[in-house]
Image (tube, helix red, strand yellow):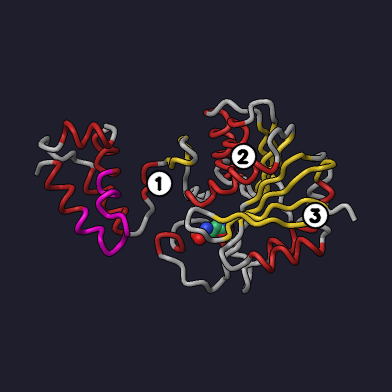
Amino acid sequence: MIVADALRDAAQRLQPVSDTARLDAELLMAHALGASRSDMLLRHMRDPAPEGFGALTDRRARHEPVAYILGHQEFYGRNFEVGPAVLIPRADSETIVEAALEACPAPRRVLDCGVGSGALLVTVLVERPDAEGVGIDRSEDALEIARRNAAAHECRAQMIRRDWHEPGWTADLGRFDLILANPPYVEDDAPLDPNVRDWEPAGALFAGADGLADYRVLIPQLPALLAPGGVAVLEIGATQAEAVAAIGAGAGFETILRADLAGRPRAVIMRLGLG
Ligand code: GLN
């Protein structure tokens, strides 16, 4: 079978699994060919379909995300290693980067709470090469991926194992001009797509019955980590703006919201009030 026909068959087969079945098939085919997608479309459509393509399509048909199959995902125009230990960076989270760079244009020290793949922290550090970063995560497997992404993008970041549920986790971290976090915020019983629910790390997604459990623990601990004039930028779910702002107010924060590309509230920008 030639590439063009194998692509058509695979796109059809992946229809029930994916909203982007044709694109998924093309990305997997390009991967199997060892070519870029544009190269494949321009030059390889009449070549024999490569041996490995069927196995890749089988994996996608079992809902495994394309990013895990390929082992990488683009975020903010750069490539990041990903694997099942980390959440796949979403385009919506680019809002967090934009909000952070705007709210804190020249950070010296940046902390990412729940660093995962490192996509948020590394992107900010690449955009602001004078800054240095600390990424914390409770998953050692995630930290290894984050370290490789920091090294690949040549930024100064330390990735250390910490869990904000454990007392004393902030002890020796020092203070930061900018704190980033995309904590778990999905309700435990939310009806998630099987592509997410069956493959992405539960520990990075779920946060109690109302999805607010991690904000309740994390936000009150942030003032002690902020340098004077510092700012915290957190990702939120579309319906959580008011609740998270209230948690922030309880910790002394004033909150500004920022919407994502779809116009839904996505980032909360928190600064300590003067009063
Ligand atoms: N935005 C992610 C999702 O909807 C959730 C990310 C998170 O919990 N931090 O799958």
Q: Nearer the viewer, mark 2 or mark 1?
A: 2
Residue 246 location, quadrant: bottom right
Q: What type is the residue that disc 3 sits on?
A: Gln
Label 2 neighbour load within 10 Å: few <14, some 14-19, many 20+: many
Q: Earlier in the sequence, mark 3 or mark 1?
A: 1
- Say how many tags the image has: 3
Compared to residue 84, the image places residue 227 above or below, namely: above
Q: Residue at x 65, y 47 (%)?
A: 137
* Residue furthest right in the image: 275
Q: Is residue 13 magenta?
A: yes
Q: CA distance from mark 3 to mark 1?
A: 33 Å
Where is residue 63 drawn, in percent x and y? Answer: 35, 59
Q: Which residue is mark 2?
A: 121
Residue that label 3 marks:
221
> What's under tag 2, amino acid-wise?
Leu
Q: Position of residue 90 (x, y in %)?
A: 48, 50
Above or below, 8 relative to 131: below
